[in-house]
């Protein structure tokens, strides 16, 4: 799939200078509302980072499909080997089923601003869907964050059934791609 699948457009918005979590925690220390906002991101005066030895700031652990009455279908994103294995796995989605995606991730060292999930779905090489879901801004935390996406309905009918290829990406406001991978799914009459 081509790099222009995501169609990221140039913005006139200028991002400010990057600051570490410790620097952000010290800014405007006497402003009560900013102090509360920073604490909601996990920034406390004097503290920064999780102490993780992993050099990645954002570590994607998994993305899962949640469907009522069924166990979650979990895609492991925690290692390079797990992501490579996705090329040989196909997820089945029942036509017309309501589902939602949910993602689990860690933020290790600095605040990640404007983290979002994007994917492009193709069938027989033709783009049939593009989704962009804003996850938000997060501070360093030793415990994983979990974000659930809005409920969706799988397409249905004879024409919708078949094999689909997906290219997914997690990117932040700074344009840093934290993870990008390919996977696939089949829409079938039943779950299989």
Image (tube, rainbow, N blue to C red):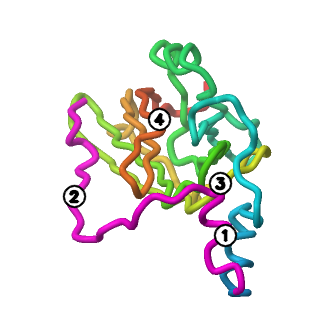
Q: Quadrant of residue 29?
A: bottom right
Along the line of sight, the residue nearer the viewer: 169 or 142: 142
Placement of 48 over or under 3, stated as above or below: below
For marks 3 and 1 on the same chain, the one whose residue lies earlier in the sequence: 1
Tag 4 and tag 1, C-beta contact below 8 Å: no
- From the image, state whether disc 4 or disc 1 is nearer to you: 1
Q: Please, what is the dominant secondary structure of the magenta stretch?
A: loop
Going 34% across and 42% down the picture, which residue do you hit?
Answer: 120
User: Spatial distance from mark 3 to mark 2, Cα to Cα?
Assistant: 25 Å
Kindly identify which numbered label has been placed on residue 26.
1
Q: According to the image, label 3 marks what residue? A: 147
User: Spatial distance from mark 4 to mark 2, Cα to Cα?
Assistant: 19 Å
- From the image, state whether disc 3 or disc 4 is nearer to you: 4
Q: According to the image, label 2 marks what residue? A: 9
- From the image, state whether disc 3 or disc 2 is nearer to you: 2
User: Spatial distance from mark 3 to mark 1, Cα to Cα?
Assistant: 28 Å
Residue 51: x, y in percent? 75, 39
For marks 3 and 2 on the same chain, the one whose residue lies earlier in the sequence: 2
Secondary structure, mark 1, is helix
Query: How many other residues sit within 10 Å of disc 1, few (<14), some (14-19) or many (≥20)?
Result: some
Q: Quadrant of residue 156?
A: top left
- From the image, state whether disc 1 or disc 2 is nearer to you: 1
Tag 3 and tag 2, C-beta contact below 8 Å: no
Kindly identify which numbered label has been placed on residue 179.
4
Q: What range of the chain is rendered magenta?
A: 1-30
Going 58% across and 18% down the picture, which residue do you hit?
Answer: 82
User: Spatial distance from mark 4 to mark 1, Cα to Cα?
Assistant: 30 Å
């Amino acid at each position: 799939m081509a790099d222009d699948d995501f169609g990221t457009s140039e913005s006139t918005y200028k991002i400010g200078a990057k600051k570490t979590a410790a620097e952000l925690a010290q800014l405007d220390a006497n402003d009560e509302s900013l102090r509360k906002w920073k604490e909601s991101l996990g920034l406390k005066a004097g503290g920064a980072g999780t102490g993780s030895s992993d050099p990645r700031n954002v570590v994607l652990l998994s993305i899962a499909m949640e469907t009522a009455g069924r166990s979650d279908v979990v895609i492991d994103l925690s290692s390079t080997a797990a992501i490579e294995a996705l090329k040989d796995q196909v997820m089945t989605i029942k036509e017309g089923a309501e589902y939602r995606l949910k993602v689990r991730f860690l933020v290790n060292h600095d605040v990640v601003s404007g983290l979002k999930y994007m994917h492009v779905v193709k069938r027989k090489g033709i783009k049939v869907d593009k989704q962009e879901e804003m996850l938000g801004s997060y501070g360093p935390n030793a415990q994983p964050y979990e974000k659930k996406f809005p409920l969706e309905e799988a397409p249905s009918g004879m024409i919708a059934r078949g094999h689909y290829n997906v290219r997914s990406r997690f990117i932040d406001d700074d344009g840093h791609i934290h993870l990008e991978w390919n996977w696939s799914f089949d829409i079938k009459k039943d779950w299989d």
